[in-house]
Image (cartoon, rainbow, N blue to C red):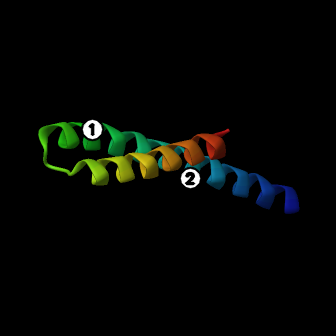
């Protein structure tokens, strides 16, 4: 029973990692053109890029 719970927890963590990685990657793809077009200020784009990088990095680590 304990092994089954451990496997389920590991699977949930991997799924969370995949979601975090995907969200970070999609957000980065959407933020960059907005910054170049002048819709977002540069400081906001850099702040978002930092957050997106952290989210994608954490997601990649959790996926593995």
Question: Which percent across, then down, holds residue 24?
Answer: 43, 45
- Going by the image, does 64 lie left or right of 31? right
Q: Quadrant of residue 29?
A: top left
Q: Quadrant of residue 30?
A: top left
- Which mark, residue 49? none
Numbered disc 1: secondary structure: helix
The answer to whether residue 27 of the structure is visible from this angle is yes
Q: Secondary structure at mark 2?
A: helix
Within 10 Å of the Cα at label 2, are there few (<14), some (14-19), or many (20+) other Cα atoms? Answer: some
In this rendered view, identify the residue nearer to me: 18 or 32: 32
Residue extending farthest right: 2
Find the distance from the CA under tag 2 to the CA under tag 1.
24 Å
| Residue 17 relative to residue 2: left or right | left
Name the residue: 13% across, 44% down.
Answer: 38
Q: Nearer the viewer, residue 2 or 16?
A: 16
Mark 1 = which residue? Answer: 32
Residue 8, x across and y down, in percent: 71, 56
Report the number of discs.
Answer: 2
Check the picture and name the quadrant holding the C terminus: top right
The picture places residue 5, in percent across and down from the top left corner, at 78, 61
| Residue toward you, 50 or 8 | 50
Residue on which the image places disc 2: 16
Which residue is the extreme one toward the front? 43
Q: Is residue 1 visible?
A: no
Q: Residue at x 19, y 50 (%)?
A: 40
Q: In the figure, is residue 11 to the left or right of 46?
A: right
> Which residue lies at the image location 35% right of the left edge and 41% below the top edge?
28
Q: Position of residue 47 (x, y in %)?
A: 38, 53
């Amino acid at each position: 029973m304990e092994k089954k719970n451990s496997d389920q927890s590991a699977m949930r963590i991997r799924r969370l990692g995949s979601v975090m990685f995907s969200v970070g990657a999609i957000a980065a793809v959407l933020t960059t053109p907005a910054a170049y077009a002048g819709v977002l200020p540069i400081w906001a784009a850099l702040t978002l890029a930092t957050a997106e990088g952290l989210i994608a990095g954490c997601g990649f680590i959790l996926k593995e």
